[in-house]
Image (cartoon, coloured by chain):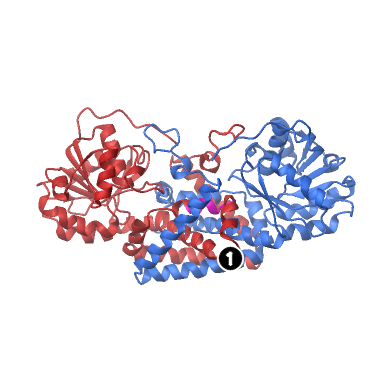
Chain colours: A blue, B red
Amino acid sequence: MPERLGPARKKPLFDKIALIGLGLIGSSIAHVARRQKLARDTVGFDADADVRRRARELRFCDIADTIEAAVTGADLVILCVPVGAMGDAARAIAPHLKRGAILSDTGSVKSGVVSAVMPHLPEHVHFIPAHPVAGTEYSGPEAGFATLFLQRWCILTPPDSAAANAVQKLTEFWEAVGSHVEVMTAAHHDLVLAITSHVPHLIAYNIVGTAADLEEVTQSEVIKFSAGGFRDFTRIAASDPTMWRDVFLHNKEAVLEMLGRFNEDLSALQRMIRWGDGDGLFDLFTRTRAIRRGIIAEGQETAAPDFGRHIGEENGPAA
Amino acid sequence: MPERLGPARKKPLFDKIALIGLGLIGSSIAHVARRQKLARDTVGFDADADVRRRARELRFCDIADTIEAAVTGADLVILCVPVGAMGDAARAIAPHLKRGAILSDTGSVKSGVVSAVMPHLPEHVHFIPAHPVAGTEYSGPEAGFATLFLQRWCILTPPDSAAANAVQKLTEFWEAVGSHVEVMTAAHHDLVLAITSHVPHLIAYNIVGTAADLEEVTQSEVIKFSAGGFRDFTRIAASDPTMWRDVFLHNKEAVLEMLGRFNEDLSALQRMIRWGDGDGLFDLFTRTRAIRRGIIAEGQETAAPDFGRHIGEENGPAA
């Protein structure tokens, strides 16, 4: 799965990029923007003074002391804050946005972000919402790295009124970052991500909570015997709580719809177990293998056993 | 997480080990038995002639043509077949077992295996059921490797009547393989594994099935955008269908009990989303992080971001 970033650009795409929010996503964009020379200046800001201090030490971009200073003169501004903080961030930057600037974001929900951000924006700004489908379970400015978006997909959800050249410019940006770009409506995005991201996180958080609350099985037993499958779920259940609270609050309808499908299917499986329908179980368990093969073939996953956890072991598995 | 196997033994633990079933688990035991010199002879058998042929080419142990030849004279026989095949295997080997031999297995369910195997056994054999909590999503004799059990836990569920020296000998065997050993009752094992392994597999199979059946979201979209979290679930949903069908058919009560808890908790979460209870969501999402930290601290999981998927990338994350 690992690939490489291409050579850096000879001519930057933007004069000044402003990154608002310096967690995993904002700091990773800063790393790759520097590595690929995507802008003459990249300036970051975070509402948390402690994050700004740590980001300054990490030196992945210049850090502004105020949000106004960060966005002033920027021709690309990217909001990398939790979905619930997008509205406030938009209100704060709106008066200082350069005429003709592109404003984008990286939120995991799109319809909710559009309704929170749009009302604050001046007419002369091009708002092109985006969602890079990439991440790790770590958060904060220390978690960022240049290859986070490499070979991942970035979804743009431009409104009908969006200027084609602004969409084109943002597409070039994400391609220069190493991503593939797909365009769809905000509503469709929210439905697709509900099943490929939001419901998976929800059920991972849920089973980890269920296991933590049992009385018949101790916490120590859950931890020791987690290699039976449980530990896989703990990774995404260790993701940033604020980010994920906001996702569920802002993509309620699509999440509840997909969760309803999940529950229906789970009831059917439960019934197969209760009534000993081995053929039904076998059929599903065979069908699900094909999807993983597709994900590996499309370059979205490693083919190494166990996510590559055994890489580097003497007498480990064949690759 | 990767550690190393210790030096090979000077004196083998057994004269002859027989491995019945040469999939991922049987072949991995063969690899490590050879690497650590745990027996003078290790002989494997598989009911499938094609598997025997492939195993012969892989040369990880001697391969017998009949189950009788495999177990004759063995002082340790390990059944590494799917749970549903344990009874037939026990009946086939029973007349040929050496007096005083230890018979064990590697099934993911213990009560069901005990009831299937015990009735066939002669009095002079020590039956000590075992379950090494380790695996990958790959199956077959090609999938085995020597470090599969390294630093993992192996659970023994000896019956009350078991001879202490037989339990001790099997404990030494699994420790020589690189595992930690824990002893508990078969019933408790089945409850613990229901939450740490069986229900996680069930919900992983289920969500992959749900995603495959949607009409509003294409298969291609599910694959492309799987890095949002979904792809993690596809790993265990690519596990061996026969093995997992048998697990659910033979650990029905414990699985349905734990699934009931999971469903109750999921309903509560669903309600929090519907009513916008951000504090409730945030509390759960914070609590679940601690369990992963415990799993990493106990050496059952890598601390590398994203399971180490980015290992080897230039400009990848800090370790």
In the image, residue B46 above or below residue B43 = below
Residue placed under numbered mark 1 in the picture: A258
Location of residue A196 by image quarter = bottom right
Depth order, front residue of A94/A76: A76
Location of residue A60 by image quarter = top right
Location of residue B255 by image quarter = bottom left
Q: Find out whether residue A232 is within the magenta segment.
A: no
Q: Chain of mark 1?
A: A
Q: Identify the residue at image location x=64%, y=62%.
A: A191
Q: Find out whether residue B229 is within the magenta segment.
A: yes
> Residue A39: image x %, image y %?
78, 35
> Residue B216: image x %, image y %?
61, 66
Image quadrant in which the N terminus of chain B is located: top left
Drawn side of residue B237 relative to residue B94, left or right: right
In the image, residue A52 above or below residue B79 = above
Drawn side of residue B20 relative to residue B178, left or right: left
State which region is magenta: B228-234
In the image, residue B133 above or below residue B274 = above
Q: Amino acid at mark 1?
A: Met
Q: Identify the residue at image location x=53%, y=59%.
A: A203
- At label 1, counting other C-alpha atoms closer than 10 Å, the crowd grade (few under 14, some 14-19, many 20 or more) is many
